[in-house]
Amino acid sequence: MKNYKLNKMFQILFPFFFITGIFLIVLGFNDKVEKSISYEEDNSINYNVYLKKNSFFDTPYLPENRTYIASLIDYFDVDFNYKVKYNKKLTGKYTYNFVALVRANKKDSEGYYWQKEYNLSEEKTIDVKNNVNVNINDSVKVNYGKYNDILNKFKKEYGVSTNGELKIIMRVNNVSKFDKIEDPINLSSEMSISVPLLEQSLEVGVNKDTGSNKDIITFKEKSNRHAYLIYKITGFILLIISILGFINVTKANKIFKKNNLYEIELDKILKNYDSIIATVTNKPDIEGLRMIKINKFEELLDVYNEVRMPINYYQDRTNDESTFVIINESIAWIYVLNKHRFSKRVDNNEKKKNGDERK
């Protein structure tokens, strides 16, 4: 009986172990730690506008921050200076290239009719090793007339009213490994100047977009802490123990219950109704009384509620029999719990159940 109660307790504990195991496994696989990289860009663009041969300007080019006559522009010489500083040392590769973007913008609303990119250079590579600063300084020459002619051709062919734009872009990409960060980080940046097209006889202004950024990149990375591995192993062990343990104690209790239904039922009665049951050492003397035999203990409880007399309990260990008696005046109500008859009744019920299943 003691083992049965202990197994019942484990039946309650094993589901708790199972839930704890799942929690530990989830905790173990949640092995990501938050890391961050901060950086600050300080980009700049300088340019000169070279002129076609003419009888008015004495210099071959004009410096920036001027307005220019479109018909006199030969090409732009644009110097891009990309500078970035990180809070962690990095090792990896920086790649960059120059692109010309020709766009036919809508005049009276946002958006565009057409755009196309033209490569101005091959992709170039710079190696960075164990440094926090990166500096790329390079220049590109852009034939203004070439892209002006392209957009003029588009306008004449389709007859749209458009504001033309030439955008000279430097695109920078970085794939590097940073100090104390396991996975490579991919960062990109872009800066450009914009020049109007289709303005053959008008003044041309140049707009810069250096794309300087100051930001903190936050991401999650797999942790190398052994604690997460311990969580996983412990969690799986608890899962296996709880599943196998629950199955074993359930089987053991089922077998015990089948073989000890008398003891279980007796223990249940004595435990639940201890306050109204009087244990006696001698079998109650009911000779000469009117005896009423009762089939269920619950019916004896109904009698107790009516007459309010104690229930006398006597155990005959020789015959594995327990007798519960209520005596009131000349009547004795008797309920007998007999181990052999109890077991026989259970066996008959099982045979009946098995017979129904075969049908």
Image (cartoon, rainbow, N blue to C red):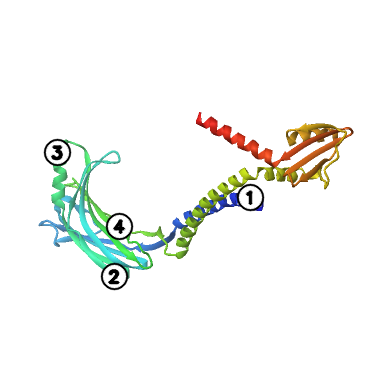
| Residue type for callout 4 | Ser
Identify the residue at the far bottom of this view.
Answer: 130
Going from the N terminus, do you reach mark 3 or mark 4 first? 3
Q: Which mark is residue 156?
A: 3
- Residue bearing mark 4: 189
Between discs 4 and 1, the one toward the N terminus: 1
Task: Find the distance from the CA under tag 3 to the CA under tag 1.
Answer: 96 Å
Q: Determine the secondary structure under disc 1.
A: helix
Residue at 24%, 55% in the rendered image: 169
Query: In the rendered structure, are the residues bearing label 3 and label 4 in contact, judged by CB atoms less than 8 Å apart?
Result: no
Residue shown at 66%/43% (left/top)? 261
Find the distance from the CA under tag 3 to the CA under tag 2.
Answer: 52 Å
Inspect the image, locate mark 3, and give the three-letter code of the amino acid beneath it: Lys
SS under mark 4: strand
Q: What element does badge 2 sit on?
A: strand
Camera-nearest label, 4 or 1: 1
Residue of label 1: 4
Q: Quadrant of residue 159?
A: top left
Q: CA distance from mark 1 to mark 2?
A: 70 Å
Q: Nearer the viewer, mark 3 or mark 4?
A: 4
Q: Nearer the N terminus, badge 3 or badge 2?
A: 2
Q: Which numbered dot is residue 78? A: none
- Label 3 CA crowd tier, 10 Å (few <14, some 14–19, many 20+): few
Residue to which mark 2 is pinned: 129
Viewer-proximal residue, 42 or 199? 42
Q: Position of residue 228 (x, y in %)?
A: 46, 61
**CA distance for labels 4 and 2:** 20 Å
